[in-house]
Image (cartoon, coloured by chain):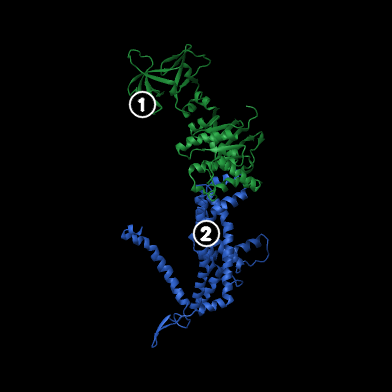
Chain colours: A blue, B green
Amino acid sequence: MIKNLKKQNVWFVFTPYLWLVLFFFVPLALIFKISISVSEWGMPPYRDLFSFSENGLKINSTLGNYLFIFSDPFYIRSYLNSLSLAFTSTVLCLLIGYPIAFYVAKSKPSIRNILLIMLIIPFWSSFLLRVYAWKVLLQGSGIINSVLIHIGLITEPISMLHNHYAVILGVVYTYLPFMILPLYGYLVKFDLNLIDASNDLGAKPLNTFVKVILPLSLPGIVAGSMLVFIPVVGEYIIPEMLGGSDKLYFGKIIWDEFFVNRDWPIASALAMSGIVILVFPIIIFQLMYAKYNFKNE
Amino acid sequence: MSEPFLQIIDVSKRFDNVVALDKVNLKIAKSEIFSLLGSSGCGKSTLLRIIAGFEKPDEGRILLEGKDITKLPPYVRPLNIMFQNYALFPHLNVTNNIQFGLKEEKISKEEINHRVNEILNLLELNGLEKRKINEISGGQQQRVALARCLVKKPKLLLLDEPLAALDKQLRVQTQFELVNLQYKLGITFIIVTHDQEEAMSLSDRMAIMKNGEILQVGNPVEIYEKPKDKYIANFIGTANIFNVLNKNNQIIIKELNYEVKNINKKENYVKCLIRPEKISVKKLENQSDNLNIGVVKEVAYLGSYTKYLIEVNGFEFYSFMQNSLVSDNLQIRWDDKVQISFNETSIYFFND
C-alpha cells in the first residue's frame, strides 16, 4: 500500500503519527524521565538524569519514587477512590445515557437533529464554567436551597456542596454526552424491524431488550464507558471545585505533589503508575472484546 | 365462506392526518394464500403491521377465529410475520435465530431441539446450524426467516414482500416452494406484495389496494379477466381499454368502429377491456378489405410471444401473439397493415 503512495501523500499519512509522537510520546517520555529522577531543591526541582564529573558519566536514577508511593496507603487509597468514582459515574452515565440515546436515535429525523444539538450545546461553553455553575446551584445560598426553603420543604439550607456526591453529580453531568454520543451512533443504525421481529416471536419488551437490543448495542456501551471511565480516573477539576475533604482523588494528589509540594519526581511516578495500572487491564479487555466481536461477525 | 378465519372490520389508520387505511373490510378463509397487492403507499404494509399488532388501528377491529385480537400486543398473537429484509438477529447463529421464538414459550429443551431439527429438515437448512446470518446466502436467509416463523407453528403467517430481496431465478423457484410448503402445512398465508406476477402465481385470492382502500377482492382469474375499473385493469397485466358508444340499441367500440352484436345488454357500459393476448393480428394479403385494419407501430419479439403495438384511426393498443411456429424471421414487421380479430366473448364491459 505504502509503495503506491506519492511522496506528498506519505506526509498526509504520517502527519497523525507525527502529532502522536510530538504531543503524546515525547511528553510521556519526559514524565517517565522525571519519575525516575531524584528530587532536589532548585529549578527544575529534580537532579539531571545524567551528569558529568571527573569520574565520567554518572546516572542519577532511582526507583525510590515508585517504592515510596506503593508503600504509602495514602496514595493507593486515593487511586482506589478515583477508580470507584470512575466506576460509579460510568454506571450512572450508562443508566441515564442509554434511554436518552435510544430516544434520540428512534425519534423522527427532524426532531433527532434538534435533540442532538441540545446534547452538544453544553460543549460550546467552557467546561470550567459549567462546573462552576453547579457550585452556584448547590451552595447554601444557591438556587436549589432557596427554592426548597421558599416552598417550605426545608427551613435551613442543606449542605450539598463539598462532598463526594457533589463530585459524582458534576462528573456525571459533564461526561454524560461522551456516553450518549457513541451509544447513539450504534443505536441509530439499529434495525427497528429486529424489535418487531422479537416481539412477534413472543418476546415481551424486557426480553427483547435483554436478548436483542442490549447485545447489539454492546459496542456502543463499551465505547461510551471507556470514554467516561478513563478520563474520570484522572479527573482533577471537578473534585477540586465540588469535592470536599471526605474523599481524596488521584488527580488532586498529583496536582498537590506537583504544585504544592513541588515534588515533581513523586508526582510523575504517580502519573506513570496511574497510566500503567489502567492501560494493562484496558489492553487485555480490548483484545478479548475484539476476539468476541470477531467471533460474532 | 363459512366462519371466516380472519376478519378485518372497518379498520382505519391515519399517520399525521395522512390516511393510510380507510374503513378496510376483509374476510380471509382458513388455509388460503391471500395477497394484498398495490403500489407503494397504498396501505398494504400498514394493514399487515396492524394484523401483526405493531400498529393499533384508529378504528375498527380484527377478529382471528372469531376472537377480537385488536388490543393484543404482538407477543401474544398466535401469528408470525416474515419481514421483507428478514430481520434476522445478526448476533445469533442460524439455530439460535430459529429457536429464539420457541425459547419464549414454556417448552422443554428436548421439544425445542426436536422442532428445530424438524424445521431444518423441512427447509433444507441442515449443515448451516452454526453459521452466522451474514455467512449465508440471501436465499438461505430467506429460508431461515421462514423457519424462524414456522417453527412456532403459527395459525397465520404474514409475509411482507417475501421474494423481493431475491434475484429473479431464485424468485421463481422460491415461489413454487412457498406454495408447496403452504399446502403441506395448511397455514393461512397473507402476503403483501407490489409485484402483480408474484401475487397472481402465489395467491388463492387477492385484494387490490389503492389509497388505503380495497378496490377489489377476488381470485387471480377474476381480477385479471373482470377488473372492476380501469385502474385495476392497468395494474394487473397490460390492458387495452376502449370507449363504448350506446346508440339506438347498438353497442359500438368507438376506437375500432366495431359493433358488438352478441351481447345481452343490461346497462349502458361506457368502457370495455380486451386483453392483448385476446386480440390476434394477421398480415393483410389483399389490400381491398379495409374493415378492422391496423398498422403495426412497434414489434417486440420476446421468444415465447411477440408484442405488437397496433394503430387504428390514431388509437394505439397492444396485441400479444404466441410464436407457435418455428420461423427464422418475423412474419409481421413495422408499418405492415394487419387484420385485427377478436372473439366477442373476450370483451369485458365495465363502467368507469
What percent of the width, then of the height, locates residue A70? 55, 76
Between B97 and A48, the one nearer to me in the picture: B97
Residue B296 in view in this figure: yes
Q: Secondary structure at mark 1?
A: strand
- Camera-side residue of B162 and A239: B162
Image-quadrant location for residue A85: bottom right
> In terms of secondary structure, where does tag 2 sit?
helix
Chain to which the residue tagged by mark 1 belongs? B
Q: Is any part of residue A141 visible from this angle?
A: no
Amino acid type of the residue tagged 1 in the rendering = Val
Q: Position of residue B281 (x, y in %)?
A: 39, 20
Q: Is residue B320 left or right of residue B267?
A: left
In the picture of the structure, the residue carrying the numbered disc 1 is B299
Q: Badge 2: how crowded within 10 Å, few (<14), some, or many (20+)?
A: some
Q: What residue do we see at 43% from left, 80% from top?
A: A49
Distance from Cα at disc 1 to Cα at disc 2: 63 Å
Instruction: Please give the label number shown on residue A5.
Output: none
Residue B187, x across and y down, in percent: 60, 35
Quarter of the view holding residue B16:
top right
The chain identifier of the residue carrying mark 2 reads A
Q: Position of residue A44 (x, y in %)?
A: 44, 79
